[in-house]
Image (tube, rainbow, N blue to C red):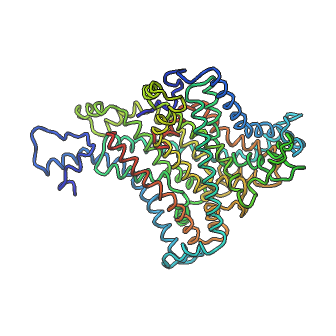
Amino acid sequence: MSQSAPERVIAPGGRAAGTTPRGQAVKFTVLFALAILFLLPMYVLFVTGFKPFAEATAARAWSPPQVWSLEGWETAWTALAPGMRNSILVAVPSAVISAVLGSMNGFVMARWRFPGADTVFTLFLFGMFIPYQAVMIPLQQMLVSAGLMGGLFPLILAHTVYGIPICTLIFRNYYASIPPTLIEAARVDGAGMLRTYASVVLPVSAPAFAVTLIWQFTSAWNDFLFAVFLTGPNSWPVTVQLNNVAGSMVVPYNQQMAAAVLASLPTLIVYLVLGRYFMRGLMAGALKG
Amino acid sequence: MSTAQNPSGVAHGDPGPTSAPARPPRGRRALHRARTWLPGLLLVSPSILLIGVFVYGMIGWNTRLALSDKHAPVQEGEFVGFVNFVALWQEARWPAAVANAVVFTVVFVGGALFLGWLLGLLLDKGIRGEPVFRTLFLAPMAVSFIATGVVWRWLMNPAPAERATGLNALFVHFNLDFLVNDWWTAPDFGMAAMALPAIWQLAGYIMALFLAGFRGVPEDLREAARVDGCSEWGVYRHVVMPQLRPVLLSAVIILGHMSLKVFDLIIAIAGQQIVADVPAVYMWAMVFEVRDPAKGATIASYLLFAVALFVIPYLVWTVRKERSEGR
């Protein structure tokens, strides 16, 4: 399992043939130009967010603010705070539960296999790719008739259940790198499955937990589809509230942009601080471990 | 238990004691093996139950709805066969939504693949500031489609030049007036503009996939080609790229399945304006505005079918290949 491949920084062979100084300069220039293009939306977000209401106009669209103001941020924060709270209350428990389930599944499917494990695994994986629209109407109906709609529970349930496939995949690929002899040794020593899992597998699982927790937190935080189908005004997560703020024509741009930044900050910070683990999750999403 | 008749079926990848010197009778052996794998099955069973109910059960329920005439939430709903599936094509909105999704998919998948590949290629050999570039190009992946939509709706504001914001204003400022356009509100190819934010968001991911792929190609393979007189570009074309077909396939699957069910981005940029209608938005309207469960379920079934058509072969192929490589 090439867990380390994606984040390898140094190219194999270093600066081998074909990297003349001129070639390097051309490549750097192209990359730099593309980086500017990539930064444009981010520039707009930050700069517009700091403009006072009077400056958030078409005429000054691209200019930096003449007066730096926090007014956009304050209003945006007031509008988004309940949504941020809801998002945390949904994303954290569902990340933890699906990571735990994924760890158990991954262990069994990599190192304690049962007949038909591959079929079950494939069926799980399909759950990762389905358009959630295909389960949404029944899910909604079921939650309504069970009287569970209204709070945050529906969203926690959805993110937990539909997060199981990717968590299983990440842990399975991770555990496949544990030498079978290690498991075998525990077995010979008379350890049952749970003992083997707890004493051999769990102690080395921290990196995979980091990957799945981050992945699950990010996808639950950024989700909009489940949120619009399964929550009401009191339980709207931050994405729905951001869309409400931005979707209304009366909200000035400085507030819209500030709201978009605020709603993105938690996941962006996770990405910047724990980028390594974020990357691994992305790679697993491509079934590439 | 079928394993009693066919114990060899159990041995598949089973790390259990398969080559015990003194062979006990068949039935006992199977029983012994079952004792080793049964706890595993038990440990996975909560997840099997959840996935069984919430993925496959719900899909089944949804299919039944789609095949019924439950056109109002209170209605009972009788089985009517494929009536709803046929009826969709006879209206104006559905084919238009499908056409929009196709234009979006082609531009988005093509654009993200090309840009991601280009970025990967430029970064492959290592360049000054590589970590900064990588972090920047990948950063949009950490953000929601809604947040992306908020800023791109501003960037792609179609207002006429004199009160233009966003990119149009930038074009006017640099005397590039011919570039000023209606963006996603253009009737024919507005969906191509709609794909731009999606490309911005996903290109970095594709870059990361290709970069990992490029660097997974052994250096001696490249070196051998160079010795044979290949130019550096020839090395990529004839040695590296052919090795990257699996990466390309994964990238197409990821982008394709995201693209077909695109929803958040459209809602954030266009709301429910019909010019940017796609199946997922149509389905949402059926549930919340028209309140027609059967029709909503029919659209959802089409979405599932479109995704399943290429995801299932891909999954079966991946798991089999892995198994045959002995993982």
Q: Position of residue B51 (x, y in %)?
A: 43, 55
Q: Quadrant of residue B100?
A: bottom right
Q: Quadrant of residue B275?
A: bottom right
Q: Is residue B258 above or below residue A111?
A: below
Which residue is pictured at 41% across the width and 58% down the height? B52
Q: Position of residue A179 (x, y in %)?
A: 32, 31
Q: Is residue A33 visible?
A: yes
> Toward the viewer: B280 or A84?
B280
**Going by the image, does A148 lie left or right of A64?**
left
Which residue is pictured at 68% across the width and 47% down the height? B197
**Going by the image, does B43 lie left or right of B177?**
left
**Going by the image, does B14 lie left or right of A45?**
left
Q: Quadrant of residue B182?
A: bottom right
> Toward the viewer: A285 or A17?
A17
Which residue is pictured at 9% across the width and 40% down the height? B22
> Toward the viewer: B256 or A268?
B256
Q: How many marks?
A: 0
Q: Is residue B233 above or below residue B9?
A: above
Q: Is residue A227 visible?
A: no
Quarter occupied by the N terminus of chain B: bottom left
The residue sitting at the front extreme is: B229
Q: Position of residue A193 (x, y in %)?
A: 30, 40
Q: Is residue B285 above or below residue A190?
A: below
Q: Is residue B80 above or below residue B127?
A: below
Q: Position of residue B43 (x, y in %)?
A: 35, 47
